[in-house]
Amino acid sequence: MEPYKTVDIAFGRGHLTVGLPERAEATVIRKATLPKLADQTGAIHAAFDNPIDAPPLATLAQGRKSACILICDITRPVPNRLFLRPMIETMMAAGIPKDGITVLIATGLHRPNEGVEMAELVGDPWVLDNVRVENHFAMRDEDHVDLGMTATRETPVRIDRRFVEADLRIATGLVEPHFMAGWSGGRKVVAPGVAGHETIRTFHSARFMEDPLAVQCNLVGNPLHEEQLEIVRTLGEIYALNTVIDEDRDLVHVTFGEIIASHLAAVEFIQDVTRIKVPRRFKTVVTSSAGYPLDKTYYQTVKGMVTPLDILEPGGTLIIASACSEGMGSKEFRDAQTRLVELGPDRFLATLTAKTLAEVDEWQTEMQLKPMRIGRVMLYTSGLDAEERRITAVEVIGDLDAAVAESIQRHDDPHVAIIPEGPYVVPVHEAA
């Protein structure tokens, strides 16, 4: 056991140093080390030229009059600055007019990204100067095409018209563990990314959320994944660019091609790197919300609470650090958190189980019930006002080091698990 005295964990745009007491025995859980790409731009061009189950991008673009490129919103650190311009230039060289190309921000039900934030998200002024960059608005029913319902679970399928009606449709994103859909990226950028509110609220209803197979790193039998696959197959021809990044947020892997096949290829690359086997459970677990941009809100912080639950000993203490620089999140999420505090976990859950459509953002409060069922949850944050801290429904702490030391003493167990990158790493308990 390496004698750690301090460990840096992701926090805001930097790191937070966790000091450990003398008797602590720390297990630091990270992704496996990924080799850096010598030429990131070259890797992107190679992916365009050698796609999976599809012709090269230059060939795909020939004869098309329009294209819609989906990008994730500001909550995902996708390296858009590396691939958007070469993707668009390839389309234009093949004959698609630049006024026929739209970059559509797949916000789901998140707020739009405008102004300076949009510029940061896109990462390349050339893109903003040459093509339309627009936000998806899930609540605008008139912006969506009604494609009926899925056959298996009768999910209403409403997808943004700009994507449905484009001649060439490409989703781009980051492949990382997702605490409900198994893995992010690919089909998830389409639905819920540019889906209407009824589609999204169905995905987040209790019948999906409480399904034991709707968990991180699992696609087999995952109801969310299966619905997403049915939706993209209903839409027809869609392609995807899938990226994988390391702890430094550098691009280390990229695939391009048919949306399902190229996404699965990226998952195959990343799954053993991200899903880390741990031979024991811990009574003290310290994690993060992965730093900026994921820890901008308490809403996103819940993901970091759910991901390490497989290694948290029942009755143990989960300590999470998140800047929450933008506060709680949406008004709807605040309302759900207030109801959780007023009703308590059991009565709150009972209000959800009969609903076909979840209320906007209350699903994240439902996910918070999972760590609360297992143990004690503590939050260290530099954001949130007094009322916001009250409605987190967890214990807000002012001294991270003291909380770790106190947990070790309370449980009379020096073993501590520390996950510096939060929900980007999935620890899995497998006894040796």
Image (cartoon, rainbow, N blue to C red):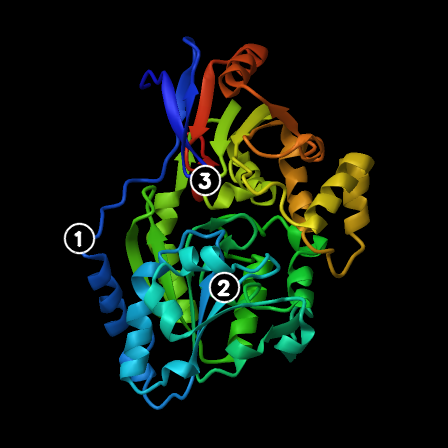
SS of the residue at dot 1? loop
Which residue is painted at 42% across and 59% down in the image? 119
Q: Are marks 2 and 1 in contact (CB under 8 Å)?
A: no
Whichever of callouts 1 and 3 sits on the residue coming sooner in the sequence is 1
- On the question of residue 52 being in view, the answer is no
Q: Quadrant of residue 43?
A: bottom left
Q: Is residue 223 left or right of residue 247?
A: right
Residue 35 position within the rendered picture, expressed as x and y whole percent measured from the top left: 23, 46
Secondary structure beneath dot 3 equals loop
Q: Alpha carbon of mark 2 to alpha carbon of mark 1: how far?
A: 28 Å
Mark sitting on residue 104 = none
Identify which amino acid the numbered label 1 is placed on. Answer: Ala
**Above or below 213: residue 286:** above
Asked whether the beta carbons under mark 1 and mark 3 sit within 8 Å of each other, the answer is no
Q: For the view shown, which residue lies furthest in the bottom direction?
A: 63
* Separation of residues labelled 3 and 2 (CA atoms): 20 Å
Provide the residue designation for mark 3: 290
Residue furthest to the left in view is: 38
Q: On the rendered structure, is 300 left or right of 175?
A: right
**Residue on which the image places disc 1:** 38
**Residue at left offset 55%, top offset 38%:** 324
